[in-house]
Image: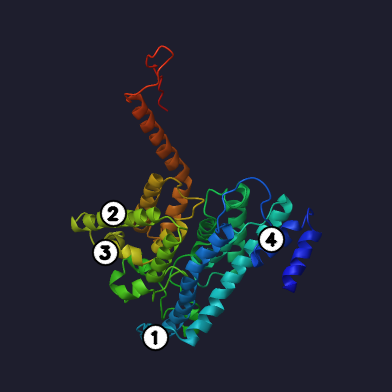
Amino acid sequence: MSLKNNLHKLKEKYKGKKMAPAFNALHTFLYTPNETTHSGSHVRSADDLKRTMNTVIMALVPVLIFGIFNAGYQHYAAVDAANGVIRQASLLGNFLTWDNFIMGAWTVLPLVIVSYVVGLAVEFVFAVIKGHEVEEGYLVTGMLVPLIVPIDTPLWMLAVAVVFGVVIGKEVFGGTGMNILNPALTIRAFLFFAYPTWMSGDKVWVHEAVERAGTADAISGETVLGYLAQGKGSEITYSVSDMFLGFIPGSVGETSTILILLGGLFLIFTKIASWRIMVSAVIGALAMGLIFNGVVEAGWITETSKFYGLMSFDFWQHLIVGGLAFGIVYMATDPVTGSQTDKGKWYYGFFIGFISVMIRVFNPAYPEGVFLAILLMNVFAPTIDHYVVRGNINKRLKRLKNANILPKDAHGEEKKLKVETV
């Protein structure tokens, strides 16, 4: 209680001054604001931006915890593989262990800390400069960023990318609610284009596996998509259950499809995320996968083609490897950068899934396309909504034009309405 009182006193002391947004943000982050509306009629709800962001974080926490265990598991599995021992994942046997948790926490938590410290510092600086309140938008972004990067991403590199993503992806547009690109994806895109060798290959997904094994070529930490892109599908040792449960290398939070699915259901139940976007994105991904499978079955692509591995991959398995499921549930459903109309959400989601699988297949150097697909559709979301709204207006005008009942003038005769289409 004394901490709350002291923070409240600081808020009053610096009220109207340059540093007021910083103290207000700290007070709001820890406690419920003690300000109420004094006049006028208002729509009142128990929900607000802070609670919305906290709900999304609640949906991300299981994925984060699993990512911590998986980071440790993949590390020790890779070391064992270098010594000729092949591990078979067992959830209660060799996965949920203290060794895996400690190793994973040692590598994952610094990513989380750097993401939040650097990102919130930038938010505070802009709040003080512009004189507006610090908003809660970065609470989710700060959690998403460490979950969509490789486990061994250098911390300085992550810090640079976070500064770029927050400034260019959000603040230049006016802050939370005004950005046209998802800030977390902007950070991921910056990392990919600025430091491509740290975002692909077979040495970045498993923590220090090469160094701990003591040999440079004894093991490989390549992802499932990496094997397929290189035409090494026959070397994949992971089962479908491993892929679905998440016992595979990959970015920190993208591997466990089952936890991502449960998180998606939670967001739908709490009405935070759009089920239309999720369902249509899944349909789009399956449609593109079916097309590629059909091309292979028709014999138009042979095994010598560099596209064969990913084209012949079972269409439904695209959903359980890579970041597709994670992107659909947590990134595509961003209410700020996605489509706002119900019909627009179907188009928006479908093209995200469709384009994601297309990029996977046609870009072997970067077989993970969901984040680029979402950024592309972020740009087109306003256009989609524009045409949906215009189509609705034209439909109503056409209905009015063909209506039998028209208003009458003073002489009791029906008025002639001039209807123009837009």
Query: Label 3: few (<14), some or many (≥20) within 10 Å?
Result: some
- Label 3 to label 1: alpha-carbon separation: 29 Å
User: Is 242 located above or below residue 195 in the figure?
Assistant: below
Marks 3/1 in contact by CB < 8 Å: the verdict is no
**Residue type at tag 2:** Ala
- For the question of whether residue 91 can be seen, the reply is yes
The kind of secondary structure element at disc 3 is loop
Question: Which color scheme did the rendering employ for the protein?
Answer: rainbow
Is label 1 or label 2 in front? 1
Residue at image location 42% in from the left, 42% down from the top? 384
* N-terminal-most mark, 3 or 2: 2
- Label 3 to label 2: alpha-carbon separation: 12 Å
* N-terminal-most mark, 4 or 1: 4
- Name the residue carrying label 3: 314
**Residue type at tag 4:** Asn
- Name the residue carrying label 2: 287
Q: Position of residue 16 (x, y in %)?
A: 78, 53
